[in-house]
Amino acid sequence: MKKTKKKVNKKRVLILFLVILIIIILIFLTLNLKSNKTLKDKGYNNLEIIEIEKLTKSEIDTILKYDYNENLIYMIDSENYNPNKLNLYLKYTSKYKDIDYLKMFELINNNEFKETNIDEYVKYLDKYDISNTIKYVNNLKNDVELNDTTNGFLSEKYFIEDNLDRYLSYYEKHKDLSYKEIVKRINSNLDYEFYTDSKAADLSKGMYTLVNKFFYLDKNYVPDDLVDVTGIYARDKAQLKKVAYENFVKMADDARSKGLTLKVTTGYRSYSFQSTLYNNYVKADGVKNADTYSARPGFSEHQLGYSADLTNKDNVSFYEFQYTDEYKWLKDNAHKYGFIMRYSKENEYITGYVFEAWHYRYVGVDVATYIYENNITYEEYYEYFLK
């Protein structure tokens, strides 16, 4: 009797399990058929439905809120598809049918996209770059008109929103220059005369502090942790900030392994030393000429302690250094040690100094490498990335 009862119970359990399984399958099939029917009612064909049903239930529910969208499959199959933005894709490709859906898709995917500005974006989408349109509408609309000139500046790599009025003003006087060149000049403050509109250098930037003909150091400023440059690394008595010195040693040692010699002739200069130096040059050549090759006191980056003037084993003059093998090596390798050649030939009008093949400034490997690879001045880098 007991065995028969156990068999009956097992049979009942098995039957119950099968019934539940059948019910689940029927529910699934019913829901699936309902979904198919609803998607078909919206106008989607079988191939489109197959693609749509790869999405989550939440995504499918979102799709069912809207009429048939002929571009839906292209959007959900895109590598840039964001399920969290599906509602926006459908909402605005449906609302603005005259706008290319790809532009709308890209617009909504932009990290700076603001839904509240959608009507303003649409005004310019057919004419201007999407990222420029977003920049303009989000930040500049109340100040200037978006036209071909404004768009030209917005397209530049080192465009700075706060400088737009200055770009446009400079453009009116220099229409022969490219947008790129104007951005470069304004970011370097060349809409002002050298030594005018000068400001105190921002020492909070540490080793990235910019000192040039627009940013000065106080006469009492003396950097901390200066160390003596000694032995084979020095031609004359000199000092550098510790980090600059340590990296110069690495650079000089690696140069030596190539049969080259690098020595520091000048590092840190005090305000009073620079004052004496500059005044002597003025007496000899006059202010205009002296300003092309010597900094006024307080405006010399030597006072920061991160700059060094170099020579080689033959102790060639500064002006002969450009013809040495050491200079050739430094051009392609100094950035690997965090140094930049501060005053290049092609950028004399930016820095305000004649070409100095011997003058190197320590800014760290990352910054030096960027400047080297992108062929920009430290003025440009500072304005765009650091200021």
Image (cartoon, helix red, strand yellow):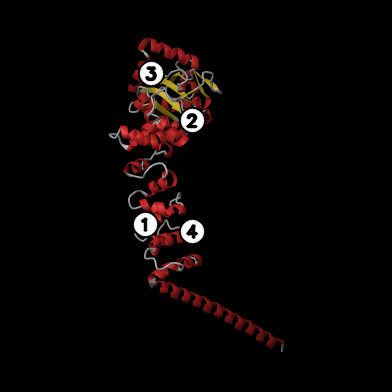
Q: Which residue is denoted by mark 4 in the rendering? A: 84
In this rendering, the answer to whether 119 lies above or below 324 is below
Foreground mark, 2 or 1, reads 1
For the residue carrying disc 4, how many other residues have a C-alpha within 10 Å: few (<14), some (14-19), or many (20+)? few
Q: Earlier in the sequence, mark 1 or mark 3?
A: 1
Q: Indicate which disc residue 208 carries.
A: 2
Q: Nearer the viewer, residue 259 or 195?
A: 195
Label 2 to label 3: alpha-carbon separation:
24 Å
Nearer mark to the viewer, of 2 and 3: 3
Three-letter code for the amino acid on which mark 4 is drawn: Asn
In the rendered image, residue 40, in percent from the top left (x then y), is placed at 41, 74
Element type where label 4 sits in the image:
helix
Tell which circle, 2 or 3, labels the residue nearer the N-terminal end. Answer: 2
Q: Is residue 338 visible?
A: yes
Which is more N-terminal, label 4 or label 1?
Answer: 4
Quadrant that contains the N terminus: bottom right
Can residue 77 be seen here? The reply is no
Q: Mark 1 — residue?
A: 102
Q: Which residue is mark 3?
A: 291
- Asked if the residues shown at circle 2 and circle 3 are in contact, with their CB atoms under 8 angstroms apart, the answer is no
Q: Give the alpha-carbon distance from disc 1 to disc 4, as whole Å.
A: 17 Å
Q: Nearer the viewer, residue 2 or 299?
A: 299
Identify which amino acid the numbered label 1 is placed on.
Answer: Leu
- Say if mark 2 contacts mark 4, CB within 8 Å: no
Image location (x, y in percent) of residue 10? 65, 83
